[in-house]
Amino acid sequence: MRSFIAILVTVFTVQCFASNWEESSEINELFKSSGVTGTFVLYDASSGNFIGHNQERSKVRFVPASTFKIPNSMIGLSAGAVKSVDDVLPYGGQDQPFDAWEKDMGLREAITLSNVPIYQELARRIGLERMQEYVSKLGFGNEDIGTSVDTFWLEGPLKISAEEQAVFLAKLAQDQLPISNDIQNNVREIVLQEKRQDWQLYGKTGWENVPGPGVGWWVGWVTKNNHVYSFALNIDIKQPSDAKKRLELGKASLKTLGIL
């Protein structure tokens, strides 16, 4: 009897979850014409509905890469690893793939430049035990950070799906994470990308195995007329020129849906 009830609950949950997804033929066409494989998810925080492209892939977990800089910033501030988003961290003095990374800087600048060594230093200051505590507290993806405190979001075992990214960011946009509102506000401020009269766009890119082949991300949210629309895109990057398609496809999808 218990097994039967469990099966019914599972089926009901899956059916309900499936019913709140709408496949967009317009976004499907955008991806087709771009020549890349990936997914795009828009999450309406008020209704709980999803619309986008490739629902099957939207549920697949990948390493978050530099999109983890968003929770990493909140964790670092909460744990006291830095006092503010402008507290300067050392990059370590080693050669980096990009010249812009070879500089000491605070989180405000580092998240804009997606500076990996700065955020690795932040993670080391947080420490493995506290990092695991906060990743679990935030419910981020599979919540598995393994044993390497400064590589788990770049190489695994931490993974998250596009749908999970969108739901997580909707909570951040609305002060609904188990982190102080001041810290959530500070992190929202440093990922603000564009501001218009009737909407604000927040976002963060990511690229597994940069600058080589891997999964590329663009995640974030739009606040429009006191309404929150969070989104997550990931694509397979096969060559460096594919990287620019993250924002191109993401913004085109948002415009197609009338969000921007």
Image (cartoon, rainbow, N blue to C red):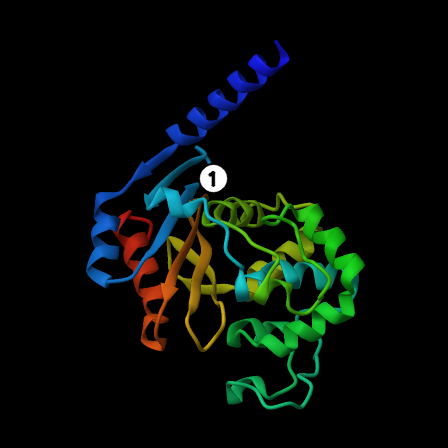
- Picture residue at 42% right of the left edge, 62% below the top: 195
Which quadrant does the N terminus fall into? Answer: top right
- Residue 182 locus on image (x, y percent): 68, 55
Q: Position of residue 7 (x, y in %)?
A: 53, 19
Helix or strand or loop: what does disc 1 sit on?
A: loop
Q: Nearer the viewer, residue 41 or 200?
A: 41
Label 1 neighbour load within 10 Å: few <14, some 14-19, many 20+: some
Quadrant showing the C terminus: bottom left
Is 156 placed left or right of 11 in the picture?
right
Vertical position of residue 228 compared to residue 15: above or below = below
Residue for badge 1 = 45
Identify the residue shown where x is 68% and y is 52%.
135
Q: Nearer the viewer, residue 65 or 108?
A: 65
Give residue 251's position: percent from left, percent from top.
32, 59
Left or right: where 95 falls relative to 182: left
Q: Label 1 is placed on what type of residue?
A: Ala
Residue 57 image point, x, y percent: 39, 48
Corner quadrant of residue 118: bottom right
Q: Identify the image quadrant of residue 243.
A: bottom left
Residue nearer the viewer, 6 or 83: 6
Q: How many marks?
A: 1
Q: Residue at x 32, y 36 (%)?
A: 22
Which residue corresponds to the image point at 22% horizontal and 56% vertical from the top-left? 32
> Can you say whether 178 is above or below 189 in the image?
above
Which residue, as the protein is rendered here, is positioned at the far top? 1
